[in-house]
């Protein structure tokens, strides 16, 4: 239907640019995705978060698990996983945390 108002909020995440286009507007945002893996916390795992700044990888320990994250990929609406990214995160983690 028709709506009128002084302001509009488009809350559609990565779909906002497309929705804005329907309204004849531009939205200066871009879809992105990050990579993370969560697994059982190994023996000797750090108890506080660690950032491997040189490699853009972070490690966040929880009670029984640990999450590792890395990379931000501007991918629009493409939700495919790049196995090379997972391999890089794993390689960097093993280098510092054997």
Image (cartoon, rainbow, N blue to C red):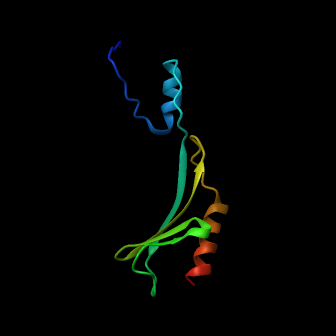
Near-viewer residue (86 or 93): 93
Q: Which residue is drawn at 39% across and 80% down?
A: 47
The residue positioned farthest toward the right in the image shown = 84
The residue positioned farthest toward the bottom in the image shown = 44
Q: How many labels does the image show?
A: 0
- Residue 96 higher or lower than 33, as above or below: below
Q: What is the x, y in percent for residue 24?
A: 52, 18
Quarter of the C terminus within the rendering: bottom right
Quarter of the N terminus within the rendering: top left
- Residue 9 higher or lower than 44, as above or below: above
Q: Residue at x 32, y 17 (%)?
A: 5
Q: Is residue 92 shown left or right of residue 34?
A: right
Q: What is the x, y in percent for residue 51?
A: 51, 70
Q: What is the x, y in percent for residue 80?
A: 60, 50
Q: In which quarter of the image is residue 83?
A: bottom right
Q: Is residue 64 shown left or right of residue 59?
A: left
Q: What is the x, y in percent for residue 68?
A: 50, 68
Q: Residue at x 60, y 45 (%)?
A: 75
- Residue 26 higher or lower than 45, as above or below: above
Q: Which residue is drawn at 45% across and 87% down?
A: 43
Near-viewer residue (25 or 89): 25
- Residue 40 higher or lower than 79, as above or below: below
């Amino acid at each position: 239907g028709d709506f009128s108002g002084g302001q509009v909020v488009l809350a559609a995440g990565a779909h906002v640019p497309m929705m804005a286009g329907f309204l004849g507007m531009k939205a200066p945002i871009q879809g992105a995705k990050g990579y993370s893996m969560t697994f059982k916390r190994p023996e000797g795992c750090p108890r506080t978060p660690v950032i491997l700044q040189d490699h853009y990888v972070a490690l966040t320990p929880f009670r029984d698990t640990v999450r590792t994250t890395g990379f931000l990929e501007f991918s629009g609406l493409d939700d495919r996983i790049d196995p090379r990214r997972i391999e890089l995160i794993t390689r960097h983690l093993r280098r510092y945390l054997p």
